[in-house]
Image: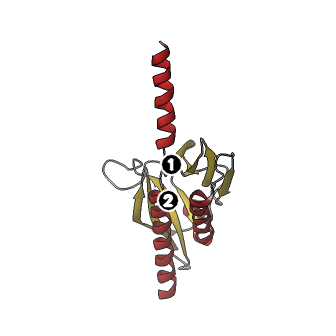
Amino acid sequence: MRYFLLLVVLALAIQGFSQVDTVVVQYDSTFTSIFARRLKDKRTAVKYRMEEFGNIRNIAIYLSSLEEIISGRKLYGVRIDARINRNLFTDAPVTHAEYIDEDELDTFIQRLEFIHDITNTDIESARYTEYRFYTRSGIALECYTGISRWRVLLLYEFDKIQMSTYLNNENRLTELIDVLKNVKREIITRRSQG
């Protein structure tokens, strides 16, 4: 029995050392982005488009545009959606997705880069440390230490169900940063064209 317990403890210790850094993003439904408010406004006629820019683990990232039909005013945002959140016969979402407004995108990217740098340079991660950043819509970027390693999460919510995505390794965090930078470049290009 003692050898069995020793084996279990050793297996858990080895598993703890073999795990990689994690990133989580979270959403709190008490907040709403400007983009989502305009999209749901029943008093305004709008044209809505979305283009997929990437998939990272269980989330899909879209460039979303909203054009008011009468005024021609355009809004852009990043749509965070679950890959499983699709209707069987169309690509329309089954549940509500969340948005990062265009004016928050640079700050969100800077925060991701900050966390990327921290997880690669902080050698004191044995001490508990936590960072949290939120968007206007309540999407949260959370980074914390535990068992001498960093965990990074993206936390968000679909129809009042809280979801979290662990980005698990540096490559996924880098991929998320790259996808968001590509979306930002596309928004700048579209704004400059008219």
Question: How many residues crowd mark 1 within 10 Å: few (<14), some (14–19), many (20+)?
Answer: many
Question: What kind of element bears circle 2?
Answer: helix
- Res 194 visible: no
User: In the image as oriented, which residue stretches furthest toward the left?
Assistant: 89
Please state the horizontal and vertical placement of residue 32, each as a whole percent of the image: 63, 57
Q: Residue at x 66, y 52 (%)?
A: 124
Task: Please give the name of the residue rendered at 43% of the width and 49% of the height, measured from the top-left corner.
Answer: 58
* Viewer-nearest of discs 1 and 2: 2
Q: Earlier in the sequence, mark 1 or mark 2?
A: 1
* Residue 77, visible in the rendered structure: yes
Note whether 34 is above or below 57 in the view shown: below
Q: Is residue 14 above or below residue 168?
A: above
The spot of residue 29 in percent (x, y) is 63, 49
Q: Amino acid at mark 1?
A: Thr
Q: What amino acid is found at the position of numbered circle 2 in the picture?
A: Leu
Give the percent coordinates (x, y) of residue 50.
43, 66
At 39% from the left and 55% from the top, the residue drawn is 92
The residue wearing badge 1 is 165
Of residues 4 and 120, the one nearer the viewer is 4
Relative depth, front residue between 76 and 128: 128
SS at circle 1? strand
Q: Which residue is mark 2?
A: 173
Residue placed most toward the observer, 24 or 191:
24
